[in-house]
Image (tube, rainbow, N blue to C red):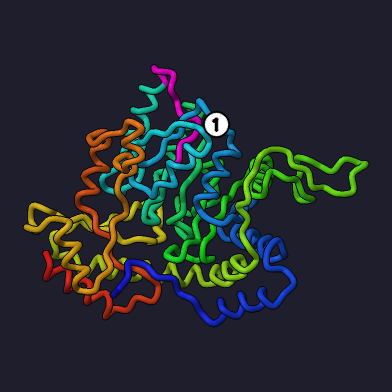
C-alpha cells in the first residue's frame, strides 16, 4: 500500500532520541527550549511554545486570547475538527466561513459579508482561525485588514503549513496574526511523534501560552508573575492550566527533523509539480498555487470532475485502495459531523465546502515517495476514472 503520507526517520533522528534516553532528563529538560528556539528562528517569530499536540496548541492559543463563555470563534468548515473544537473547550460557540473553491481555504469575501451581517446582529467573533489547508496559505493580508475593522483576533491554523511562505515571509512569522499554530503529527512536514507549537511575537501572549501549557503554574521564565522577594520557590498556580507539555524525547526528534525541513519541502514541491504534469490530461481539477504564497504541500488534493468520470467518489476511492493506493479524504466538513449537527448545523449552510467534500481525493505525497510510486498512482487513477 502506498500511503497518503508517511514520516521520514533517519539514523540521526534515532541517535538524537537515544541520546535523550541516556541523559538525566526525559522531560522538562534542555531539549524543549532548544526546540522552541529552533522553531521560532525557522519561522521568524519571537516566541515558540511547544506542546503535546497541535490540538493543545489551538486550545492554549484560544485561552491566551481570552476566549470564553459568551464569545464566538469562526473558522473554516474544511479542516480537521480541532480547529473548531478548541472553541468549545473554552465554553465559547463556533461558526464557519465558507471556502474559496479555488484554494480550499477561508474565502475572505465570504468572511467580509458574514462580518457585515454579524455586526448588525451584534454577534461579531472574538477570534477567527483561518486554516492553511493542505499547506497553502490563506489570503492573510485581506483577513488581517478585516480584523482591524471588526476587532477580532487571528490564530493561523498552520498545522499543514510549516515550511510554507506568504508574501515572501515564512508562515508563522505572525505578520498578519496574533498566534500561529503548528502540528508535528507523523504525517505532517516534520514529526515529534505527537506534538505541536504555538508561535507569537507578543510577550504577554507568550507568557500566557507558557503558563497554560503547564498547569497555570509560574516559573523562572514567566515574566508576568515574578517571584515575591520573600519566596525562594517560584512555583505558584496563577490560574487553571493544563498538562500539555512536550517531552525532551519528542523535542530531540523535532530538532533533528527540523534540520531536514528544507529538503522535505523541496522534495514535496518537486513531486507536486510532477503530479501537475502527469495528471493534467485527466478529468480532475488540480490544486492551484496562490501567487502570493508558496505551499508546504502537506497534502495533494485533487477534485474529481464527476460528470466526466462516470464513477462516484466512493467508487473511485474503493478502486484506488484495491489497487494499493492509500487515498484519503481531507475532510468531512466540520458542520456535517454528527456532533456539530446536534449543535444545529445542517447541510446547505456552506455550499462550497460541501461541493468540495463530494469531489475531493487526497493522493499520496511524502518525502520518500519515488517517481515510480507516483507513476503508478497516476496510471491507476487513469484506469479507475
Rendered residue at 34%/43% (across/down): 334
Q: Looking at this view, is 90 or 171 the one in front?
A: 90
Q: Quadrant of residue 259?
A: bottom right
Q: Position of residue 342 (x, y in %)?
A: 33, 34
Q: Quadrant of residue 382?
A: bottom left
- Residue 169 visible, this orientation: no
- Residue 304 visible, this orientation: yes
- In this image, 269 relative to 200: left or right? left
Q: Residues within 10 Å of mark 1 (few under 14, many from 20)?
A: some
Rendered residue at 37%/41% (across/down): 76
Q: Quadrant of the C terminus?
A: bottom left
Q: Position of residue 122 (x, y in %)?
A: 44, 18
Look at the picture and state if 331 lies above or below 178. Answer: below
The residue at which mark 1 appears reads as 68
Q: Looking at this view, is 22 or 78 the one in front?
A: 22
Residue 377 within the magenta-colored segment of the rendering: no
- In this image, 274 relative to 268: left or right? left
Q: Mark 1 falls on what kind of element?
A: loop
Q: Which residues are magenta?
A: 119-129
Rendered residue at 82%/47% (across/down): 234
Rendered residue at 8%/52% (across/down): 307
Report the number of numbered marks: 1
Q: Position of residue 311 (x, y in %)?
A: 9, 58
Look at the picture and state if 9 lies above or below 174. Answer: below
Q: Quadrant of residue 110?
A: top left
Look at the picture and state if 175 lies above or below 280. Answer: above
- In this image, 195 relative to 115: left or right? right
Name, please, the residue furthest toward the right. Answer: 230
Amino acid at each position: 500500500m502506498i500511503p497518503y503520507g508517511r514520516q521520514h526517520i533517519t539514523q540521526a533522528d534515532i541517535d538524537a532520541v537515544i541520546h535523550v534516553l541516556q541523559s538525566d532528563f526525559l522531560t522538562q529538560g534542555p531539549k524543549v527550549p532548544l526546540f522552541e528556539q529552533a522553531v521560532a528562528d525557522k519561522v521568524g517569530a519571537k516566541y515558540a511554545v511547544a506542546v503535546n499536540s497541535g490540538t493543545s496548541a489551538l486550545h492554549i492559543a484560544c485561552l491566551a486570547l481570552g476566549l470564553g463563555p459568551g464569545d464566538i470563534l469562526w473558522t473554516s468548515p474544511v479542516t480537521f475538527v480541532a480547529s473548531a473544537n478548541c472553541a468549545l473547550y473554552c465554553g465559547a460557540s463556533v461558526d464557519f466561513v465558507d471556502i474559496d473553491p479555488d484554494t480550499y481555504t477561508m474565502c475572505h469575501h465570504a468572511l467580509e459579508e458574514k462580518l457585515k451581517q454579524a455586526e448588525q446582529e451584534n454577534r461579531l467573533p472574538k477570534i477567527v482561525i483561518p486554516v492553511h489547508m493542505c499547506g497553502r496559505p490563506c489570503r492573510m493580508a485581506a483577513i488581517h485588514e478585516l480584523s482591524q475593522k471588526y476587532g477580532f483576533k487571528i490564530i493561523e491554523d498552520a498545522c499543514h503549513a510549516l515550511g510554507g511562505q506568504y508574501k515572501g515571509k515564512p508562515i508563522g512569522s505572525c505578520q498578519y496574526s496574533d498566534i500561529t499554530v503548528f502540528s508535528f503529527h507523523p504525517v505532517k512536514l516534520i514529526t515529534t511523534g505527537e506534538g505541536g507549537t504555538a508561535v507569537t511575537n507578543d510577550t504577554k501572549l507568550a507568557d500566557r501560552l507558557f503558563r497554560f501549557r503547564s498547569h497555570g503554574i509560574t516559573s523562572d521564565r514567566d515574566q508576568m508573575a515574578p517571584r515575591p522577594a520573600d519566596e525562594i520557590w517560584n512555583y505558584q498556580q496563577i490560574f487553571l492550566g493544563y498538562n500539555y507539555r512536550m517531552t525532551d524525547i519528542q523535542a530531540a526528534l523535532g530538532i533533528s527533523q527540523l534540520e531536514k525541513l528544507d529538503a522535505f519541502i523541496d522534495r514535496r514541491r518537486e513531486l507536486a509539480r510532477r503530479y501537475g504534469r502527469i495528471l493534467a490530461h485527466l478529468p480532475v481539477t488540480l490544486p492551484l498555487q496562490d501567487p502570493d504564497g508558496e505551499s508546504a504541500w502537506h497534502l495533494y488534493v485533487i477534485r474529481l470532475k464527476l460528470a466526466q468520470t462516470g464513477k462516484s467518489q466512493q467508487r473511485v476511492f474503493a478502486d484506488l485502495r484495491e489497487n494499493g493506493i492509500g487515498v484519503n479524504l481531507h475532510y468531512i466538513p466540520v458542520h456535517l459531523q454528527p456532533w456539530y449537527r446536534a449543535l444545529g448545523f445542517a447541510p446547505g449552510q456552506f455550499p462550497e465546502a460541501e461541493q468540495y467534500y463530494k469531489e475531493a481525493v487526497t493522493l499520496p505525497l511524502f518525502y520518500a515517495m519515488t517517481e515510480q510510486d507516483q507513476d503508478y498512482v497516476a496510471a491507476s487513477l487513469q484506469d479507475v476514472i
